[in-house]
Image (cartoon, grey):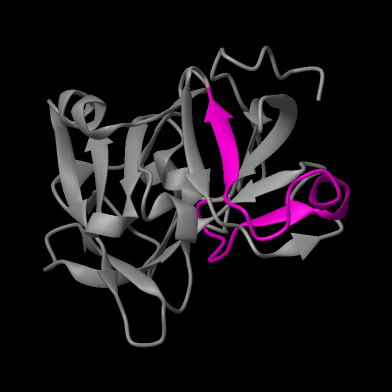
Amino acid sequence: MGGITGATSGKFILMAATLLFHGRVDNARTTIAIVPGAPHSAISETLAKRVRQGAPVKIGIRAEYFRASITGVETDPGQGADVRIGQDILDANPIEIDFAHHQLRLLLAGDAKRAERGMTPIPVTREADGTMTVPLRIDDAAPTAALLDLLRPTGVVALVASTKSIALGPVALNTADVSVGAKPSVGLGAFAKTRVIFDLGHGRIWVAA
C-alpha cells in the first residue's frame, strides 16, 4: 500500500482488476477498492463495527463525497481494502479513470459533461442474464457483441489469431493486447493506456480517442 498517496490526490494503484486508493468513509481515512467488474459493493467486518448499521455510508473520493447504502459485509472486500465499490454504486456515480496517469475522480453532473467532451461513447448492453456486452469490431468484419468482462485484468479476446485491427465501437485498440479464445470479450486491460468514464447507469463507457 506504500504506492498509494494522500486521501485527496486521486492516485491509485492497479492490482489485477482492482483500483486501490486512499479515500474517506464518514470522514475517516480508509483504503477503498474500485472493482468495475464486481456486481455488488461491500465493506469489511472491521469497518462494519464502526459505521451505523443500515445507514448510508459517506464515501469521499478526492474532494467529493457521496452517500451509498452498502449491505454486504465481507472479511476482505478487495485486496485488503475496507470498502469495495462495485457496479451497483458505479451505476449511480460515474467515475473517471485515467489509467495512464493512475488518477481517478468522482464525476458530478456538471463535471461529467465537461469530462465527456472530446471522448467517444461506447454503448453497453445489459443482457437478460445480467452480463454486459459492447460492440467489438475485428478487421473489416461487422461489429459483434463481445462480453464486457471487467473482472479480467487482460485486454481483448478475439476469435482469430491474425488480427490486423480491432476497435471498440469507433475507438481503435492496441492489437498487441489481443489473445485468442472461444468467445470475444473485452477485459479491463483494454482501457489500460487511456482515460475512461464508466457510466454504467446510462449504459455507456466514454473512451478518450
**Pick the front one: 179 or 196:** 196
Horizontal side of residue 197 vs 52, given as left or right: left
Q: Quadrant of residue 86?
A: bottom right
Can you say whether 127 is above or below 121 in the image? below
Q: Position of residue 156 (x, y in %)?
A: 42, 56
Q: Position of residue 28 (x, y in %)?
A: 73, 26
In the rendered image, which quarter contains the C terminus?
A: top left
Can you say whether 114 is above or below 200 in the image? above
Horizontal side of residue 49 vs 58, given as left or right: right
Residue at 34% x, 36% y: name it.
Answer: 196
**Pick the front one: 55 or 209:** 55
What residue occupies the far bottom of the structure in this picture?
Answer: 128
Q: How many marks?
A: 0
**Pick the front one: 108 or 197:** 108
Can you say whether 130 is above or below 65 in the image? below
Does the image show residue 195? yes
In the image, the segment drawn in magenta is 36-61
Does the image show residue 77? no
